[in-house]
Image (cartoon, coloured by chain):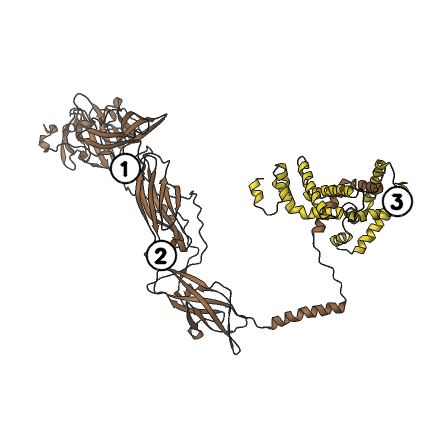
Amino acid sequence: MRQKDEIKLDALSMMDDEIIEKNTQKRNKLMCKKRAPRWILPSSVAAAVIVAIMVPVLLLLLMKQVPIYEGMTVLENYNGTSSASIDPERRGNGFDFLSDKKDNNGNGNNGDNGNHYGQNKKPTGEIVAEDSSIDLDIPEQKMYYATPGQDIYINVHISNPDNFVILSFTLNGKMYSSYMFEDGSDMENLILKVTVPADAEGIIEYTIDAIKYVDGTDIKDVIMKGERTIKVGVYTDDQPTANLSDEKTDTFGYSFDVSVNDNRLLISRCGGAVYAMLLDDTSIIEYRELGLGSSYHVEFTSLQSGAEYRIAVVAYYDSFDGKGFSAHVLYEKTIFTGALVAITDVKLEKSTLTFDLEIDERFPITVTSIDLVSNDIVVQSVDADARKFENVGYIGEYFVVANYDHGEEKGKAISTESVVIDKLSDVSHLVPGGTIFKPFSGELQIWNKSTLDFREHHAIDIKVTEDASVYAAAPGTVTSIYYDDRNGWVVAISLGDGITEMRYEGLNEYSIEVKIGDTVVGGTLIGNAESPIMEVADPEHLHFSVYENGVAIDPQKYVYYEVLPFAEYEFMK
Amino acid sequence: MDTKELKSQRVQTDEAIVELYWKRNEDAIKETDKKYGKYLLVIADNIVHNRLDSEECLNDTYLGTWNRIPPTRPVSLQSFLARIMRNISVGRFRQNTADKRIPSELVTSLDELEECIAGEDSMDRERATRELAEIINQALGAMTDREQYIFVCRYYYADKISAIANSLGVSEVTVNRTLSKLRSDLKSRLDQAGYTI
């Protein structure tokens, strides 16, 4: 290359950077644009081109348009009658079935039977799984519903701007001529009545073909563009089922084999799915998608020991019940995983409560102590080797709780069985060594030595011996402590059922051991007995009464004592 | 930007491709070639007029880009690549024409400038280059935007007259007329500066 050219090249390469950059970007934009070629034609040629293009277009516009089939629908209402329900929107959220689960213990408490130890917790009401991670891909589908034997009205839609006479069409192989169309039909909407077979079940398809129209003296075919088949779902009792077998429970897991039968292909034909689910009382914990026809082995692992779960097989499909694509529970069961420590065979004989203890020896478990619990309060504790509790006699529900070490962790195992005592076996539980001095008289007026008159006695008087201690008969809450002009110092305890109140009356003011708001269990020390003011002539005694809805009842409902003729009671002597 | 997201797009944005260079991801070259390969080859073809040489220049351009990014982070990747390709192509052109003249658009464009840059070959090449560059930049500063664009396309990128005309939507006659005016202006400036080579 000549030096001159080299110099030119070098100098050109030294052009201002900003100018180069600016024009390079401009060049990038402009060079990539495709411009239409610039045609320059003489006016006569241009006119000829316009005519050559426009004439065929005009001719096309003047030609008649061939009718075009656009699709079929099923009329929801025809002449005031309901034809077939269309339900593309009436879908559940996929988890509606879980909100039907309620606990029906009916005893007015919060539904967990007073058990707050975590394990063995029963479901307590509605279950909602809005936080489930199942990604339901509910398919978009147009589905009509009908019942067996129902008349449905199919509307064939045709674009027919030139109003050609539609002669006939074929539906499921059968030809329908124009005289068979229903009233209200025109050349763009042909209405045909068909009857769903009486023995129909599952999905019925209606396919249209060969729509003919008249053009002058010729019979021609309509252009077919729309969907040619519509589906109508008819409810069947032969719904999908699930069978579980080989169910196995372990301390931390649960497994089973499951097969799903879908004889009518309801799940597969609508793009549905089936899941095996593990739930607790509020949500879906895990799930596995199942196929159809084959048997699947499902395992749920890493569960809590000694805990309650639910297993369910849920299929998502359209069962043609009019609700569209929704969840259907094919199988449901409550399961319990095995416990590291299990307390079994809990029994009460007289006032001795016995039980058995089983430890899962695969794990390093050491039982440290065993408690007897009532109303969430530990009433007695025994050593790890003990297998009984003595002097269990007060009203209440009792559970046995084993405290244990599992490696570095601490645990509690609670008995699945409990013992319920609903009546004291003897008045001596209320007052040690006590005896009935005066019984409940109801409406009968009996002699009162202190007031020197006859009056009703709405309590039992329990005579004190050496020990004047008064113990609570049943678990409850201290609702009031007050001085009564007739009965002296009173501690009232509500049993928590909103109905029953027990009153411990005639107490020594300074001996009262409880305060308002205290939770007590059967056997809690209330205080010492003196005597009520109006029975001061009688020996020192506890005046014990029970009220239901504010009305005094015979305490025999809660305390056993031998009923004697009045004359044989000590107060009469 | 996550590389996986980049792979899911058909044509990457300039920003995404630059990011690949910064992450030293060799997909950067692939994406550059996919987006600008053909464009860059046109620049090379204009200058070296030989497909094999053009493709070698293209590879050199990619290498040059790989070595410049980072530390550079060009705002306009296309322009950045265009200038690298131009300079590499000119270098190859010099090599190829060491002994002989090769018909290329660059040669033609340099010949056009002959009418305003006359004189004999001189030994003081550096000074001559510097002075010429200064005068060319002065001339560029006085041009309109359109004149600048035509000048840069013709004498920096050696674009064909027809390509320049088409990009502006004007006739080739118009482009030639403009170039002639610009050369005339440049000649006046060179004469006034007493520039000879």
Chain that is coloured brown in the picture: A
Q: Chain of mark 2?
A: A
Residue A290 horizontal/vertical position (percent): 38, 47
Residue in the image at 17% along x and 20% along y: A466
Residue at mark 3: chain: B
Colour that chain B carries in the picture: yellow
Q: Residues within 10 Å of mark 3 (few under 14, many from 20)?
A: some
Q: Is residue A378 left or right of residue A146?
A: left
The label shown at residue A497 is: 1
Task: Assign a secondary structure to mark 2.
Answer: loop
Q: Nearer the viewer, mark 3 or mark 2?
A: 3
**On-image quarter of the C terminus of chain A:** top left
Residue located beneath label 3 in the image = B118
Question: Which callout, 1 or 2, points to the residue nearer the camera?
Answer: 2
- Tell me whether circle 3 and circle 1 mark residues in contact (CB < 8 Å): no
Residue lying at 56% horizontally and 71% vertically, measured from the top left: A65
